[in-house]
């Protein structure tokens, strides 16, 4: 059985930070491989840039609906579904035999990663108030920037 955390648990900020670092590191790990992927797919630099653009498009559009979905179905469920979508998109990218499949995978990754990022911010706003909320948001943003 899964364990439940209380709102005042010290583990919540740690879990949220791990989720956010995992989500944002996706970009940091991906961008340096552009030249190798361009060679592998025998494509142009512009097509490789589209892999980044579609990822951002999926992220930003899906972010608009993740908040209402989290309100309707619960924070945990939306984080889990988004994470599963991200894994699915990652598998599509791993097995991509063409640049078109890579573009599809990157779009799915962007849609999936938007849920944990959006919902983590909502969880922080739900649990913490005032100075404590601002402090946690600044610490998570600092940790993401450093990693």
Image (tube, helix red, strand yellow):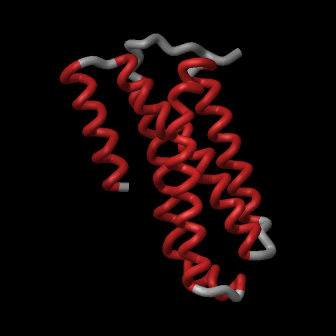
114 up-or-down from 127: above or below: below
Q: Tell me where residue 104 appears, x and y as whole percent.
A: 71, 61
State the image quarter where residue 138 is shown. top left
State the image quarter where residue 97 is shown. bottom right
Q: 136 or 63, which lies in front? A: 63
Q: Measuring 57% from the left and 43% from the top, which residue is drawn there? A: 62
Q: Tell me where residue 57 appears, x and y as whole percent.
A: 54, 56
Q: Tell me where residue 86 appears, x and y as whole percent.
A: 65, 48
Q: Tell me where residue 84 appears, x and y as whole percent.
A: 70, 41
User: Looking at the figure, which quarter contains the C terminus?
Assistant: bottom left
Q: Measuring 37% from the left and 17% from the top, which residue is drawn there? A: 127
Locate residue 66 relative to residue 133 in the image: left or right.
right
Q: Measuring 43% from the left and 27% from the top, which residue is drawn there? A: 122
Q: Measuring 29% from the left and 31% from the top, which residue is drawn there? A: 136
State the image quarter where residue 8 is shown. top left
Locate residue 20 relative to residue 39 in the image: left or right.
left
Count of all numbered marks drawn on residues in the image:
0
93 up-or-down from 132: above or below: below
User: Looking at the figure, which quarter contains the N terminus?
Assistant: top right
Locate residue 8 relative to residue 135 in the image: left or right.
right
Q: Residue furthest left?
A: 131
């Amino acid at each position: 059985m899964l364990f439940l955390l209380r709102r005042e648990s010290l583990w919540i900020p740690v879990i949220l930070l791990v989720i956010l670092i995992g989500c944002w590191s996706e970009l940091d790990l991906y961008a340096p491989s552009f030249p190798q992927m361009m060679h592998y797919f025998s494509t142009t630099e512009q097509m490789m840039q589209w892999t980044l653009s579609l990822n951002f498009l999926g992220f930003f559009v899906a972010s608009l609906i993740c908040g209402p979905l989290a309100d309707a179905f619960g924070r945990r469920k939306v984080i889990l579904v988004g994470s599963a979508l991200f894994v699915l998109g990652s598998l599509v990218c791993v097995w991509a035999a063409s640049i078109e499949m890579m573009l599809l995978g990157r779009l799915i990754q962007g849609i999936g990663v938007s849920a944990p990022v959006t919902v983590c911010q909502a969880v922080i706003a739900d649990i913490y108030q005032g100075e404590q909320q601002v402090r946690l948001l600044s610490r998570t943003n600092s940790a993401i920037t450093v990693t």
